[in-house]
Image (cartoon, rainbow, N blue to C red):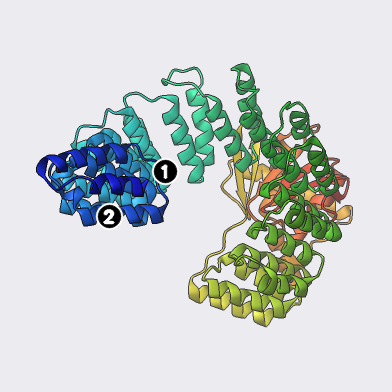
Amino acid sequence: MASHLTRALLSSPPSSAAAAATASAAAALLSSTSPLPAARFLQLHAHLLRTGLLLLPLAPTAASAFLSLAAASLPSHRALPVLLHHLALAPETLPSTFRLNAILRSLRGPDALRFLRRARALGRRGNAFSLSIVLGHCRALAHARQLHANVVAEGHSPDALLATSLVSSYAACGDGDSARKVFDEMPVRDTVAWNVLITCYTRNRRTKDALKLFDAMRGGENGAEPDDVTCILLLQACTSLGALDFGEKVWEYAVNHGYGGELKVRNSLITMYTKCGCVDKAYQVFCETPKKSVVTWSAMISGLASNGFGKDAISAFEEMGRSGVAPDEQTFTGVLSACSHSGLVDEGFKFFDIMCYEYQLKPNVHHYGCMVDLMGRAGLLDQAYELVVKDMRVAPDATIWRTLLGACRIHGHIDLGERVINHLIELKAQQAGDYVLLLNTYAAVEDWGKVAEVRKLMKEKGIQTTPGCTTVELNGEIHEFIAADASHPRKAEIYEKLDEINKHLRIAGYVPNVSSELHDLDSEGKECALAYHSEKLAIAFALLVTPQHRPIRLAKNLRVCVDCHNFTKVFSGVYHRLVIVRDRTRFHHFKEFQCSCNDYW
């Protein structure tokens, strides 16, 4: 294309009429050209600069078409200097508003904002759609506020599309309050606007607020009703919270309104069920889904893995192969994690080789993380370390080092744990949880001097740990508990019930595992500190409010401690209750003094 354009440009003598004809021909060629590879575009750019075509006063359409081609052919950060340079050289050839918007769509982030600012300074202000495009790229709160001011000043506030873009931009910047304020000021709110607000809340960890919007939308009194996208977003929110009852309410709505057959809705439902510990229900939906995609299979395999059904996950993977659906990277993450959670070391190495050599997939950091977890849980810590520092084909991230640090805690490998912490420090990625893992490692071997040193270091650096929080859903409402919680309106009943539970469990043989308490206290002090962990308060509350025939379902933001794990095993047998706990990494199904993880977590 470049050589053809070059011949067209050079074939005419440099007269005024010829220049006009050349400009017209060039504009037509440029306008009909698809994006070019960057190298070919740069060749074309050099030629047009030499001929001076873009500076001809009779060729504004050619210059405008060239700007569009530059934005489409080059990466955003390389296109912007070219665009700004030509705006400065030939401001009289500003692109039309249509062209301006096409260019803005091709740019990214602050580059789009900078180009719009320059075009406006030269007289091409664009329209409401121009602002909407730039807002779609905006990830800086200061830029979002500046663009919001432009929207108001230029009288675009009633524009529903622009207002929705503002809500989305504030959400992406983490300012949920501003997003809600813009939403409330919208004269008309369609379903897209509601979905954007739901996304805003879930992205900013205001999941309970997102669920409340479902009830506000139903019935259409507020101008819109939930659609299939709404159902997907809300099922994802329920997945995050472990809100099974609410998720089933969303699913019932989806079925009644014709969205039950949508594959993405069904995939989200499978994930929601598995993340709430309802593997049987997830499997039923999976079996009833006629055309299963790779996402469907991967969701089921990952769900089986996280719930401790490692061999079932492997069987599902093998059935997937027989069905003719090729696995992808996410599928292998699921099957490798199944091997990790179930201690299937040989199988894990087998599937890793299958991924690399049979399916020619390059392992990513998640696959390596599964292998490190697999080896670490099996006690192969030195081999896991060798894999990370010598054999990985991608740079290890903080998650991989934390996985290895967790294995050091399990096996009391102090020297390696200290080395791992140094790697996290080098990455400048250490968090409070990393120091807690190191504290656990020292506490496991009762090195209280080292525990004190780490605590002192954390205090000096101002490192605050994340408090453990356990949630219980009751009639669509989420109840939260932290250790020694005194905020729940039924706290007196809860503590009385927990004391009763403790008495029964001690008779059955439960003894507090004081190694789970990291403070250097005497045994009595440690037992007292352990007695009111958030899981135990949540279990006491659930026992008060949940019918005997229903499982007790809990979700915790951190890993379950050894003492609470033992407590729940004994509780499940004494009270003959199924207790399903989702912690940060997996599920535990407690029944009749046993846990599905076989104490391997």
- Pointer 2 or 1: first along the chain: 2
Residue flagged by tag 2: what amino acid is it? His
Q: Is residue 539 left or right of residue 575?
A: left
Q: Measured from the top left, where is residue 349 in percent x and y?
A: 80, 60
Q: Which mark is residue 47?
A: 2
Counting other residues with Cα less than 10 Å from the Cα at mark 2, is it few (<14), some (14-19), or many (20 or more)? some
Disc 1 target residue: 171
Residue flagged by tag 1: what amino acid is it? Ala
What residue is at 51 percent from the left and 71 percent from the top?
428
Q: Quadrant of the N terminus?
A: top left
Q: Are marks 2 and 1 in contact (CB under 8 Å)?
A: no
Q: Secondary structure at mark 1?
A: helix
Q: Secondary structure at mark 2?
A: helix
Q: Measured from the top left, where is residue 439 in percent x and y?
A: 66, 72
Counting other residues with Cα less than 10 Å from the Cα at mark 1, is it few (<14), some (14-19), or many (20 or more)? many
Q: Quadrant of residue 4?
A: top left
Q: Measured from the top left, where is residue 572 in percent x and y?
A: 83, 45
Q: Residue furthest left?
A: 16
